[in-house]
Amino acid sequence: DAGVTQSPTHLIKTRGQQVTLRCSPKSGHDTVSWYQQALGQGPQFIFQYYEEEERQRGNFPDRFSGHQFPNYSSELNVNALLLGDSALYLCASTDGPYNSPLHFGNGTRLTVT
Amino acid sequence: ILNVEQSPQSLHVQEGDSTNFTCSFPSSNFYALHWYRWETAKSPEALFVMTLNGDEKKKGRISATLNTKEGYSYLYIKGSQPEDSATYLCAFMNSYDKVIFGPGTSLSVIP
C-alpha cells in the first residue's frame, strides 16, 4: 500500500521562474493539502483540495496555485519565485473529516537562487 | 491571527528519563488537536488525534492529554529511548480541515 509520494525530491530554481510540484495521495485518500515548512518553523498551511476544488486556503499570495486531478493526485504551482519561497514543501493526504490524521510525503526541497 | 505555541523549543534528556512537552492553542472554536512525530530524513508521522476535552490517548510509552477549555495539550514520553529523538509537532484545527501547526519541540535522547 503506497503512502504519499512527492516529486521531485529536490529542485533548484532562479528568482522569477515558475515551479510545479507533484503529489500522489495514499491509496483510498481523496483530500490533499499542501504545506510550506521554512527553517525553524512548523509547516504552514497553503491550501487543501477535495473533489478537484480548492476547499480551504491559508495566507499565501495568488502566486501559489494548485490543482487536483480525478485520480486525487495534486500539483502545487508557484509563479514568479522569490528567494523567500525557498523551503520544504510537504503534501499530506487524508480520507476526509477533521479528526482523521494527515499522512505526509517526504517533501520537496525547493531552493530559489 | 491564530497562534499555536509549543514549549520548550528543544530538549535534551538522558536515556531512561521521562519528559513532557506543551502545546498551547486558542480555546475558541476547537475542532481537533493533532500530535505528529518528525524524525530526521523522514516524513511527519501521526501520533494522536484528539477531539474531546479531557481526552487522554496512549501509544506505547507515549501519551497525551487535552484541555480544550484552557487551550493546552501535554505530550508525555516515559522512559525516553534514543529512537524517540525527533521533532514533535502539534497541530490545531478550528475550522473544517484547516490545520495550524506549532513550531515544534526538538527532542534529543542521549544514550
Image: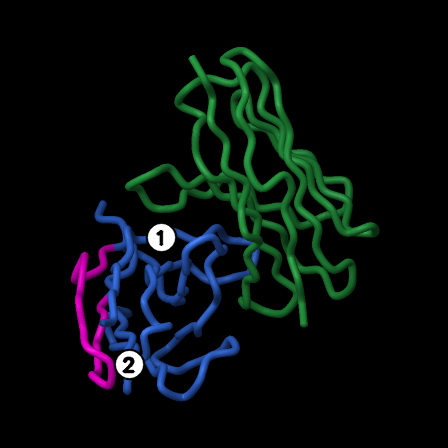
Q: Nearer the viewer, residue B42 or B33?
A: B42
Instruction: Please indicate whether residue A112 sits to the left or right of residue B70 in the image.
Output: left
Q: Quadrant of the C terminus of chain B?
A: top left
Q: How is the image coloured?
A: by chain
Please state which of the two labelled residues, at mark 2 or mark 1, is closer to the viewer.
2
Label 1 packing within 10 angstroms: few (<14), some (14-19), many (20+) = many
**Circle 1 sits in a helix, a strand or a loop, which is it?**
strand
State the extent of the magenta-drawn residues as a range.
A5-22
Q: Is residue B37 left or right of residue B9?
A: left
Q: Position of residue B57 (x, y in %)?
A: 62, 33
**Residue A14 forms part of the magenta stretch:** yes
Q: Which residue is mark 1?
A: A104
CA–CA distance between discs 2 and 1? 24 Å
For the N terminus of chain B, the image quarter is bottom right
Q: Position of residue A20 (x, y in %)?
A: 21, 76
Looking at numbered disc 2 in the image, what kind of residue is underneath it? Leu
Label 2 sits on a secondary structure element that is loop
- At x 39%, y 82%, the residue is A53
Disc 1 marks a residue whose amino acid type is Phe
| The image quarter in which residue A69 lies | bottom left
Q: Image point 33% across, 63% down: which residue?
A: A89
Q: Residue at x 58, y 24 (%)?
A: B77
Closer to the chain start, of discs 2 and 1, is 2
Would you name the residue on which mark 2 appears? A81
Instruction: Say which of A34 and A14 sits in front.
Output: A14
Hue used for the chain lettered A: blue
Indicate the chain on which mark 2 is placed: A
